[in-house]
Image: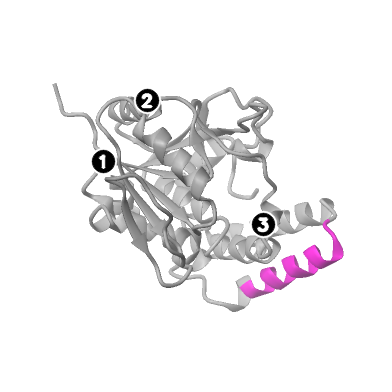
Amino acid sequence: MSAPLKVGAVVITMGNRPEELRALLDSVAKQEGVPVEVVVVGNGSPVPDVPEGVRTVELPENLGIPGGRNVGIEAFGPGGRDVDILLFLDDDGLLAQHDTVELCREAFAGDVKLGIISFRIADPDTGATQRRHVPRLRASDPMRSSRVTTFLGGANAVRTRVFAEVGGLPDEFFYAHEETDLAWRALDAGWMIDYRSDMVLHHPTTAPSRHAVYHRMVARNRVWLARRNLPALLVPVYLGVWLLLTLLRRPSGPALRAWFGGFREGWTTSCGPRRPMKWRTVWRLTRLGRPPVI
């Protein structure tokens, strides 16, 4: 019998949720099978007390979500190569079951092309899953697992060979859409992504707009995402669709001004290296139910 896949976990924290962080780490420690090695990254802040055996890295400044997670990846060797799978978990989340890691091992061992698994996020009190937490257009049934084209940043597992092939998360995004950037690059390299409703992270129901930078960075990073990854013909289509959807949602005046400021910034600043996906990847995304125009 082959040895079980090695699993590590990366948690980034601002140090302001010590009780929730401890509960998350306890839920990781309770996972069945070979223990998970955990690294907690203090993103511009000290790391609260953590259980013995949990490694910590304290950064002198906040590098943003993708930057902090990339530091966590490198704590497991270049590209995370010291382990086979890396979990990425929000510091105020909680693994709801004790078999989640074993399910991850089985999924990756059973499908050599599976690169990323997106967990289901559920409110700990109601059990409800927000529509935005189901990473597909047909999101009315969160209990249906399926192949998808993106994943949830704070509740996922990634085969570390993906990082070796396509690189890590885009540091410059800081917040928003960094997962889709990695997902598109992974799909373009031939990897697949699964949404698994049976792998659950409990997380309080929140609105993403609680972050002050939300509207600006969502718009800026949407432009960067398209400029970095889409064939030139699809860039204006994709961004035109998202401009229309934003206007139809009728955001407040300040929110809309911030959004347009970010949209402008996305065109006038560097987006990083441009590596447009192959047209066969566009077709794959379309067959999976989400053509890269929305």
In screen coordinates, is 29 left or right of 270? left
Q: Secondary structure at mark 3?
A: helix
Disc nearer the start of the sequence (1/2): 1
Q: Which mark is residue 13?
A: none
Any part of residue 84 in sight: yes
Residue identified by numbered label 3: 237
- Numbered label tally: 3
Looking at the rendering, in which quadrant would you find the N terminus? top left
In the rendered image, residue 268, in percent from the top left (x then y), is placed at 61, 78
Residue identified by numbered label 1: 84
The answer for how far apart the CA atoms under marks 1 and 3 are is 38 Å
Magenta range is 251-265
- Work out whether residue 260 or residue 102 is closer to the camera in this orientation and state it: 102
Residue identified by numbered label 2: 103
Which residue type carries mark 3?
A: Val
Please tell me in which quadrant of the rendered image residue 254 appears: bottom right
Q: Secondary structure at mark 2?
A: helix
Please tell me in which quadrant of the rendered image residue 257 appears: bottom right
The answer for how far apart the CA atoms under marks 2 and 3 are is 39 Å
The answer for how far apart the CA atoms under marks 1 and 2 are is 14 Å
- The residue lying at 82 percent from left, 51 percent from top is 249
